[in-house]
Image (tube, rainbow, N blue to C red):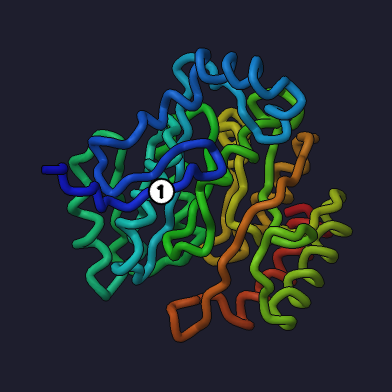
């Protein structure tokens, strides 16, 4: 008799060389892909130039990434976003801020509040994305801080590419850009046009040429964030412009790296609207031209 064939699915390696599995006990320790042995082996097998292009590098000893996740009415996705964050294998502090949700989001987040890598914060009333981000910044203790939306539009496996220039000392601030590269989902023309106009005006007013100022993925060493945190004011989406302007005033070196982006529609829960676009224009004037 022959043993029955193993009908478990075969998962191809992902872009980081890791093999996914439905059984978490069988998964390779993701943290090993940031360690000295793995990086040295990849340098030997692929060469340093290829490793640089693939963003294969070693993390400093004791490194911690703080991920600030503002959440509003995302009960269906918030726990899966935490799973995706953990799947990166990065040493991570995950800060979830419920901004007055009414759909059971806080209850979903509460299932994670005793996990050692998670902090849960609750706003009693909806105060806006900017207010949630500021609450998260105040709790961050990691070496580097990044913002992550809870709606699955962004893929945290792209953190690797944003971290690389910061760890190497080649830049002080890393932004993920959704535009200007080939590996991306095409957004509606009006969405990209409005974003392009806001980004152009912000670049002129602030003084650095960006391609996507409204990107969620803004990655900054905490030591730089601490310099601007006492001055942050914006409670809604204007925080994107304000943070950028205040960081630029510090004379920091900015870099952009391409990221993937899966656009969702308003009937799927997208929240930013035309009023936020008008608010962004005012923030460009306020923090860029008037330097408030």
Q: Residue at x 17, y 48 (%)?
A: 4
Q: Residue 13 appears at what percent x and percent y?
A: 49, 42
10 above or below 181? Answer: above
In this view, the residue in front, 269 or 247, is 269
Whether residue 148 sits left or right of residue 284 in the image: it is left
Q: Residue 248 appears at what percent x and percent y?
A: 76, 43
In the rendered image, is residue 225 in sight? yes
Identify residue for label 1. 11
Residue with the most extreme bottom position = 267
Residue with the most extreme front position = 1
278 above or below 250? Answer: below
Whether residue 205 sits left or right of residue 183 in the image: it is right
Q: Residue at x 24, y 62 (%)?
A: 106
Quadrant of the drawing holding the C terminus: bottom right
Q: Residue at x 86, y 52 (%)?
A: 209
Q: Residue 32 appears at what percent x and percent y?
A: 43, 23
Secondary-structure class at tag 1 = loop
65 above or below 206? Answer: above
Quadrant of the drawing holding the N terminus: top left
236 above or below 92? Answer: below
In the rendered image, is residue 278 in sight? no
Residue with the most extreme left position = 1
In this view, the residue in front, 105 or 151, is 151
How many other residues sit within 10 Å of disc 1, few (<14), some (14-19) or many (≥20)?
few
Report the number of discs: 1
Whether residue 108 sits left or right of residue 251 in the image: it is left
């Amino acid at each position: 008799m022959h043993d029955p064939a193993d009908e478990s699915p075969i998962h191809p390696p992902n872009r980081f060389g890791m093999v996914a599995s439905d059984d978490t006990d069988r998964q390779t320790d993701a943290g090993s892909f940031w360690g000295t042995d793995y990086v040295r082996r990849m340098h030997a097998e692929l060469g340093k130039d290829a490793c640089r292009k693939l963003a294969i590098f070693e993390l400093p000893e004791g490194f911690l990434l703080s991920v600030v996740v503002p959440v509003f009415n995302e009960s269906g996705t918030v726990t899966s976003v935490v799973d995706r964050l953990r799947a990166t294998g990065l040493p991570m502090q995950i800060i979830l801020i419920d901004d007055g949700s009414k759909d059971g989001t806080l209850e979903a987040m509460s299932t994670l509040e005793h996990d050692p890598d998670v902090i849960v914060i609750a706003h009693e009333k909806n105060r806006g994305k900017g207010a949630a981000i500021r609450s998260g910044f105040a709790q961050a203790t990691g070496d580097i801080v990044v913002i992550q939306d809870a709606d699955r539009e962004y893929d945290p496996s792209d953190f690797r590419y944003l971290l690389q220039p910061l760890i190497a000392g080649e830049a002080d601030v890393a932004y993920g850009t959704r535009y200007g590269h080939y590996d991306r989902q095409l957004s509606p023309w009006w969405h990209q046009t409005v974003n392009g106009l806001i980004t152009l005006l912000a670049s002129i007013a602030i003084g650095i040429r960006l391609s996507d100022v409204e990107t969620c993925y803004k990655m900054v060493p905490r030591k730089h964030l601490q310099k601007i945190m006492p001055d942050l004011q914006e409670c809604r989406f204007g925080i994107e412009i304000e943070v950028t302007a205040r960081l630029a005033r510090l004379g920091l070196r900015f870099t952009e790296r391409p990221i993937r982006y899966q656009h969702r529609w308003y009937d799927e829960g997208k929240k930013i609207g035309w009023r936020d676009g008008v608010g962004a224009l005012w923030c460009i004037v306020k923090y860029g031209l008037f330097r408030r």
